[in-house]
Image (spheres, rainbow, N blue to C red):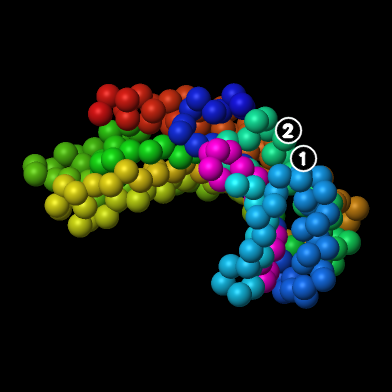
Amino acid sequence: MTQYASLADDFYVNMNLATEMELPGQRETILHFFERVQKRFPTMRKFYCRDKRDFVLEEEKDQGRYRWAAVESKRLCSGQVNPSSLDAVLDQHRLVLDLAPTFLSISPLDCEALDVLFGFDFAFRGNHNALLAEALGVGPAFDRAAELPGGRVINYEPSLTISLDEDCRVQVRVSTETRTNAFQVRTGDFTEEQLSVYVTARQYGSLEPGTTYVEAMDRLATLAREVVDTCVVDQILRPLARTISLK
């Protein structure tokens, strides 16, 4: 398992390439592409079509650890849940992107956005928004509002996006996603849902001349990992895990 496995209930690394033009959807093209992916990862045997145009190849999910890849109308995706190592999941992303120009006719020009996402899910039965506010705090500007008599936090999903170049083409976002609604808070009837923390490194626009998708993805993955290690593990993930353990 990766060094991140103990930080959350589930950890995953996804790659998404959004294109300006529609990707090919012909039967032969899609099958040939996924056959090449399966040749490298033979356990990816479950193939299906979702929403008439999204094609997915994945491993069985019953072990809680699985690979998946998808070709949508204008997006190529790859992911792995609870990977054995970061090298293992990044090698999968490299394969998918290495095959894309030849088998899906994706040019380095045809890039709306390329991103690498590190995701962390925590299973929690209760008010996700209040949990985040307790674990992370809401900041001095909102402290008094959060402490209003009789008040209950029903919406709190902190996020921050930073640009790392002058053109704002390379960005990194740290965000959270709660799955608690006002009805659950009002009734006190909660189900166990996933509270998520995301670190996304993204590049917008066509690639620089001479740059491949694999090279661009590697740079984004390195950036995302640096942000996780220096800005998220001790500042968000561990406080969140400690607070959940006390509930």
Quadrant position of residue 82: top right
Q: Quadrant of the N terminus?
A: top right
Identity of the residue drawn at 29% across and 37% down: 131
Q: Between 60 and 152, which is closer to the camera in this rendering?
A: 60
Q: Is residue 133 shown left or right of residue 199?
A: left
Residue 40 belongs to magenta span: no
Q: Secondary structure at mark 1?
A: helix
Disc ID at residue 188: none
User: Would you say the residues marked 1 and 2 are in contact, meaning their CB atoms lie under 8 Å apart?
Assistant: yes
List x then y, in percent, for residue 151. 14, 45
Q: Quadrant of the C terminus?
A: top left
Asked if one can make out residue 152 in the rendered structure from this viewpoint, the answer is yes
- Amino acid at pointer 1: Asp
Identity of the residue drawn at 63% across and 35% down: 83
Q: Residue furthest right?
A: 210
Circle 1 residue: 91
Residue 109's place in the image compared with 94, above or below, is below
Q: Between 149 and 72, which is closer to the camera in this rendering?
A: 72
List x then y, in percent, for residue 193. 35, 46
Q: Is residue 239 shown left or right of residue 83?
A: left
Identity of the residue drawn at 64% across and 63% down: 48
Mark 1: few, some, or many residues within 10 Å (few <14, many ≥20)?
few
Which portion, as a residue range, is magenta?
61-77
